[in-house]
Image (cartoon, rainbow, N blue to C red):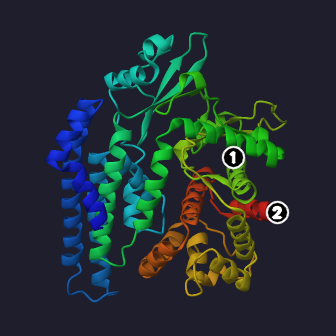
Amino acid sequence: MWRAAAKLAALTLGGAGAAAIVTSDDPSSTFKICTIVPLRLLRDSITAATMAFDYQYSLWGLKEGSIEWLRAKHEVHNRCAYRLQELCFRNGGIYIKLGQHIGQLEYVVPQEYVQTMRASMLKRCPVSSYDQVQNIFVKELGEPPEKIFAEFDPVPLASASLAQVHAARTHDGKKVAVKVQHTHLTDTAIADIATVDLIVNFLHWFFPGFDYRWLVDEIRESAPKELDFLFEARNSEKCLDNFRRLSPQMANSIYAPKVYWNLSTSRLLTMEFMDAAEITDVSAIQRLGIEPVDVSKLVSQAFAEMTFKHGFVHCDPHAANMMVRPLPSSKWNCFGKRKPQLILLDHGLYKELDFETKTNYAALWKALIFADVNAIKENSVKLGAGEDLYALFAGVLTMRPWSRVIDPSVDHLVLEGNDGDRSELQMYASQYFSQISELLSRLPRVILLMLKTNDCIRAVNHALIANPKDSISLICNLKAVIQL
């Protein structure tokens, strides 16, 4: 913790800041950074102290596990989740990425935080002004967008934590989508990570059971890659190449927008414009003549292939990063239906599974599906859960209590997605919060991202199917595992 604080102090000291401004190639940008960072650090410190005091004061004198204690903890979780949400919005950039990550860790972090972050983090992202967009174009390509393109819409189609997307048309008439990084994000990212590191370490020091330092480590590693749009473009091409080489039976069903390399840099990405339905827009999907259940099946199969065959996995598959359209080569069948094609967007966050990890992870899923207790324990231990927490790991991975995990019935891992399921899982997560925190500190970060990816796929499946069940995901997982 103190090492992170020292780094931040060195960055924000007045003398060092003045020296940085004088010697910088871009003094105005450096001045903004040196004035923004101390303000963010102040907000972080106030938020962390307020959260710590609220937990300490609200639970003081209450017997752990009592009705009063549970009610008080629920209320303080809600208050602190809101405070963290507002901190993320006010600081922006990496902080919003952190909030989105928390919102996708269902039953790994307290449910109050998940619900608060999910309800807002994809909807209230920052928007750069058109003047800022023009400045990025001039710095990256030497000219403003209205000269580079025949048409360029100054109003963004959408905005995310790190960038926003504009519609444009090239001089040869092709419609494209242009992803523009938010101003100064690259420069402030290092400082943002340092301040996030400070607040997480402070909360861990104050509450030893709250250990999410692994989340900061993951953001520290992934942020530079996500901020390099050329890295993202190469990932998209590698993903499609893996399907062509390793999963040719479904290669035509997976698509990523074509990249215009001559109009792309590390901070600008020009891609083919996708005229398709959002992955969770059931009405739009049905109007295209596609069955939502077929889309759910395709999503589950695609990620099973990436995980168990390719070992190269898109780890941010939330609803905003996937679209669907009719498979171009397919025709209407006698029932008036067409086959779907899955379009994958935002390829900035991928993880590679080495052969040993991929093999152990595949063997674990096979053991889970067949309720093989010995194999579940063996492969959970191999993946780092330990002999004391392997049952908890199986529960977190499947979102089922251990009694259901080892139930030999065919549907023992099926999630109905109803209120009863959610209540059971929330109680399970609350009861074993400290053990879950310990488990997360042990597991390799690549497995932690697999947990996040699994949860994203579940959320998409639940939105697509009227009576959501995880059986589709399980069947796709099993088919991919058996073929290894």
How dense is the environment of label 1, judged by Cα within 10 Å: few (below 14), some, or many (20 and up)? many
Residue 333, relative to residue 362: is it above or below?
Answer: above
Q: Nearer the viewer, residue 337 or 159?
A: 159
Instruction: Specify the amino acid type for callout 1.
Output: Val
Is 366 left or right of 27, judged from the image as shown? right
- Residue position for label 1: 295
* Among the 4 quarters of the image, the one containing residue 117: bottom left
**Measured from the top left, where is residue 406 in percent x and y?**
68, 83
* Among the 4 quarters of the image, the one containing residue 327: top right
Q: Nearer the viewer, mark 2 or mark 1?
A: 2
- Which residue is drawn at the image coordinates 17% and 40% (left, top)? 18
- Residue position for label 2: 484
* Among the 4 quarters of the image, the one containing residue 46: bottom left
Secondary structure beneath label 1 = helix
Secondary structure beneath label 2 = loop
Q: Is residue 163 at least partly visible in the picture?
A: yes
Q: Nearer the viewer, residue 185 or 258?
A: 185
- Which residue is drawn at the image coordinates 58% and 19% (left, top)? 175
Residue lying farthest left? 14
